Image: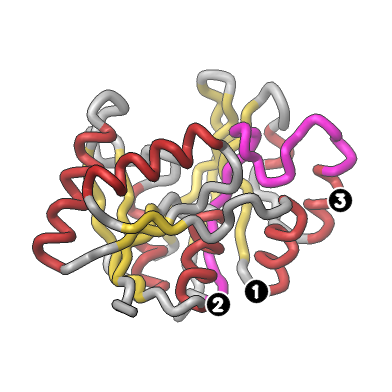
Amino acid sequence: MDILKAFVSWSGGKESSLACYRAIKSGVRISFFVNMISEDGLYSRSHGVTSELIKAQAEAVGIPIIQRKTTWEKYEEEFKNTIFKLKEEEDINAGVFGDIDLQQHREWVERICRETEIKAILPLWNEKREILLNEFIKSGFKAIVCTTNASFLGSEWLGREIDFDFIRDLKDLKNVDLCGEKGEYHTFVYDGPIFKKAVRFIVGNKIFKENKWFLEIKKDL
């Protein structure tokens, strides 16, 4: 069997981290992280974390990162162009994605991979939420909440560690997906089994914008 040489579609959050970890354990060689950022280059498109902090994550893991500026309208085009370049220059033949069970997301991933002729790997697909979170914590990953949708979670959740108390408190709410699959919250991972060292960071203000709460997180120099 040919060795799978893959990139990880990297958001900086818990699902992409756990998907990366599972892929590595299954024998996939992870050669790059791919992270799409805002057209001004300042923020990750997915979770609103600064592109500088995402870059610090990749450095702490020890895997090169490719960051591409794009608008939402040109996201797919830029993503595919990035894959084509990785195929041509680095012999990449697979992509790892952290989707759990949103069928629309899976269909997009599989179409993109089919059109670029690489293998789609979804290590978390159809897993139960609590099993994934328990594995994430027990494996030694460390993460905090960096964004919340104010319709579900208030600013008091920003900065909370992803731990067993976090799972318990989320379960008490009833109306929130444990992994935040409906966009209830996003996370920033700063340490874990794929990391060679922890990301040093400092937190700043809580910002409310477009019905979302954002936690300012900056790289600690």
Q: Which residue is mark 2?
A: 193
Residue sitting at x 20%, y 39%:
78
N-terminal of the pair, mark 2 or mark 1, is 1
Against 71, residue 190 (above or below) is: below
Secondary element under disc 3, as helix, strand or loop, is helix
Cα distance between the residues tagged 1 and 3: 18 Å
Screen quadrant of the C terminus: bottom left
Secondary element under disc 2, as helix, strand or loop, is loop
Residue 53 visible at all: no
Q: Are marks 2 and 1 in contact (CB under 8 Å)?
A: yes
The spot of residue 23 in percent (x, y) is 47, 69
Residue sitting at x 44%, y 45%:
49
Amino acid type, label 3: Arg
Left or right side of 71 for 217:
right
Which residue ends up furthest to the top in the rendered image? 210
Q: What's drawn in magenta, residue-wise? A: 171-193
Amino acid type, label 1: Gly
N-terminal of the pair, mark 1 or mark 3, is 1
